[in-house]
Each structure stands twice: as C-alpha cells, then as structure tokens.
DNA sequence: GTTTATGCAAACTGTTTGCATTGCT
DNA sequence: AGCAATGCAAACAGTTTGCATAAAC
C-alpha cells in the first residue's frame, strides 16, 4: 500500500519538475500499450519508465533490478513477459551482443525514432550507440532492401548493423 | 587461450598457408589448426569436414549429428570445444539469428573469403546468404569504420549486417 | 612419455511455463 | 464481475565445466 503511494508521489513530483518540455519519458507509450488491448499495470509502467530513462542496453535482469527499486513487488517473470509483449507490439527492440543475454531498448522516444547502431567492444562488452553515417547507411540499405526483396522474394521489415572492435581501454592491455 | 600465443602463431603461420596452394576440401584448414599449435584430431577434422561441405548455418547440435554419421565416437562437448577453438583462431564465424542457438560457418573457403551477409525469415527461421550490394556495403562500412575508429577510439575488427523479413512462403499465410 | 583432447555426467545460465492468486478495467 | 496479468517454483534448452581416460605429438 505505502509503496503504491510512494510510487505515485514520485510520479507526481517528477511530472511537476519535468513538465516543461523534458517530457517524463513514456507517457506516450501508455496509449500504445492500451491501444493494443493490453492492461497498463504498475509493473508494465515501471518497466517502461526504466527503459525511458536510460541510454544503456539493459538485460532483463538489469531491468528487474532497477524496477525492483521503486516497485519491489515485481517478479523477474513479469519483466520477461512484459518485455516480450513490448517487443511484439514494436515498442521495444531486442538485441543480442553475443554475451548470452538479450538486451532491450525503447524503439522510439517521445521525439520519434532515434535511429542508431551499435559499436560493441569484444574485450569488455561495452556498447556505444553511434549515429554517424546513418543517412548514408539508410540510403544504401533502402537500395539493398529493394533489390533483395525482388531477388529473394523477401518482404524485408528490418535490418541490423553492428560493428565489433576493441575500445581504447581494452586496446591498451 | 592466451592472446599472445595466438598472435605469434598467426605470423609464423602466414607463410605456411600461402605456400600451400588451394587444395580440395578442407585440407587447407588443417595447417591452420596445427599452425596455431593445436592437435589435429579425428573429431576436429570431422567437424571441419562437415563445415566445409555445406552452405547451411549449422548449430552445434546439427554439426554433432552430422559428424556422428561418420565418426560416432564424438561427443557433443567436443563439438562445442572444437567450435570454440575454431572461432578463436578465426577459422569459423559464430552467428546468432535470434532463435536461441548459435550458428556456425567456415570463415573462409579454399578459394578465399566468401564475403556475404544474411537474410533471416522471422516466420520460419530460414536463412539466405546474399552477395549482392556487398561492394557498396564494404565501401560504406570502410568509411564508417574509419570515422568510428577516430570518434569513439575503437579499433574496429569486424561488422555484422543482417536483414529480417518474411520469405515468400511465410508471407502467403 | 608428455601433454593435450575427449567423453560423460553434472552444473550453470538465461528464459519459459503451469497454476493458483491478484488486481485492472 | 470477469478476465488479463502476476508471482512463485519448477521445467527447459543451450552451453560449460570437472575429472578420469584416451590419444596426438
């Protein structure tokens, strides 16, 4: 009960503070969830909140831990189920960076898509978002998509680009 | 597997590989394995043989089953350990297509690199190799690599491109 | 004869599922 | 009220590890 109250207060305070233009992340997501006929529960809202507040690439357990701080009632299972649902409705992307656990990030911010790709350090696993060369990539990929659709009869919906290498720290070892 | 050791062996082995002209099958791989100081066992040879005979993207268990046909003494554990070693020396690529199991393919055929990327059907999991637009992609990626190396201080060693979509069969359902 | 590689079984890890209960709407 | 969503524990799948044995070199 009191944690419900606490959670509400957090939201209220945050809203007041951030009401301006630095929107409190995921309001717009809620309509999307409901729009698909899913119920907007505290757990789901908390998961969306965590995702909307970070640039990191969180694993299910990372998310569970962070949500747990403000909403301790949540179980890891629900995090998995929520993420699965969010991926299915296209609100969240699921990535694999080769370390055996899935990573998640919001597909879209309040300001629209934030198209970027990932730079993965094969030494320490660090992941960097980059937004350079995106225009050229998109142009090329559009072309490739058209060609591949025709040649292989695929209806292409998505693509993935990742670069692998060693970050500065790992190179100096 | 110590990095230092591997690096040394790479240089020593370079000439050996070059002097051995292109032979049939996976003969050329053997020198590479030995060159790195590993023993060429029946099991390892059989794994390489399976990989060299297919265009498919086999999982560890797929490989185990195929090797088992000609060399029933092999255990799944050895397949995993062999693949791990082959990935480490760069003879094999390891991929993840999102179905929860790793897939492997020979990095290089007797005729040299066969640079290609993958088209993944999200309906049935079918994977198609494509070799179109590779030149343009490589040109763009080279450029991106240079820029990213500089900007994010990464020494980029590799990249991954995948397209996702629905194949013809899955679209008609 | 050394040292590396192997097979087996058991451990591990991330994820999924069955089921009784809770709690949105 | 009614049904979707949840938590817990147990199941699951792919992969890894410990250890005694076998086999390359």
Image (spheres, coloured by chain):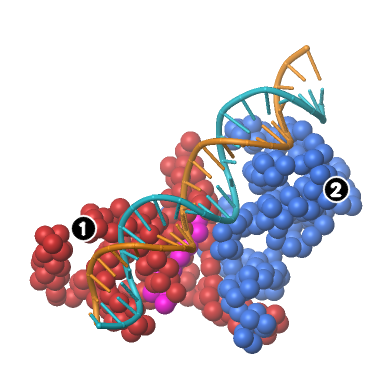
Chain colours: A red, B blue, C orange, D cyan
The answer to if A165 sits in the magenta stretch is no
In this rendered view, identify the residue nearer to me: A7 or B73.
Answer: B73
In the image, what residue occupies the spot 65% across and 68% down? B118
Residue B26, percent from left and from top: 83, 49
From which residue to which does the magenta span run?
A89-97
Q: Quadrant of the N terminus of chain A?
A: bottom left
Q: Name the residue under label 2.
A: B70
Left or right? Give the position of B48 relative to A49: right
Q: State the mark number for residue A123.
A: none
Identify the residue shown where x is 28% and y is 59%: A74
Q: Mark 1 points at which residue?
A: A70
Nearer to the camera, A65 or A165: A65
Please give the chain letter of the residue carrying mark 2.
B
Subunit of label 1: A
Quadrant of the rendered structure where residue A10 is? bottom left
Q: Position of residue A48 (x, y in %)?
A: 30, 68
Task: Name above or below for residue B77 compared with residue A13.
Answer: above
Q: Could you tell me how far apart the alpha carbons at marks 2 and 1 are, in whole angstroms? A: 57 Å
Q: Position of residue A151 (x, y in %)?
A: 71, 82
């Amino acid at each position: 009960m009191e944690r419900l109250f606490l959670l509400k207060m957090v939201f209220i305070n945050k809203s007041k503070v951030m009401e301006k233009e630095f929107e409190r992340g995921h309001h717009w997501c809620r309509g999307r969830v409901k729009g698909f006929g899913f119920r907007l529960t505290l757990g789901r809202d908390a998961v969306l909140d965590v995702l909307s507040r970070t640039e990191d690439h969180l694993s299910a357990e990372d998310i569970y831990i962070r949500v747990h701080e403000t909403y301790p009632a949540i179980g890891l299972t629900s995090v998995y189920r929520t993420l699965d649902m969010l991926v299915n409705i296209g609100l969240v992307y699921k990535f694999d960076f080769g370390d055996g656990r899935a990573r998640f990030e919001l597909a879209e911010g309040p300001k629209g898509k934030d198209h970027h790709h990932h730079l993965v350090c094969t030494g320490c696993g660090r992941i960097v978002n980059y937004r350079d060369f995106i225009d050229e990539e998109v142009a090329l990929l559009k072309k490739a998509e058209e060609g591949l659709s025709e040649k292989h009869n695929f209806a292409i919906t998505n693509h993935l680009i990742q670069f692998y290498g060693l970050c500065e720290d790992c190179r100096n070892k």
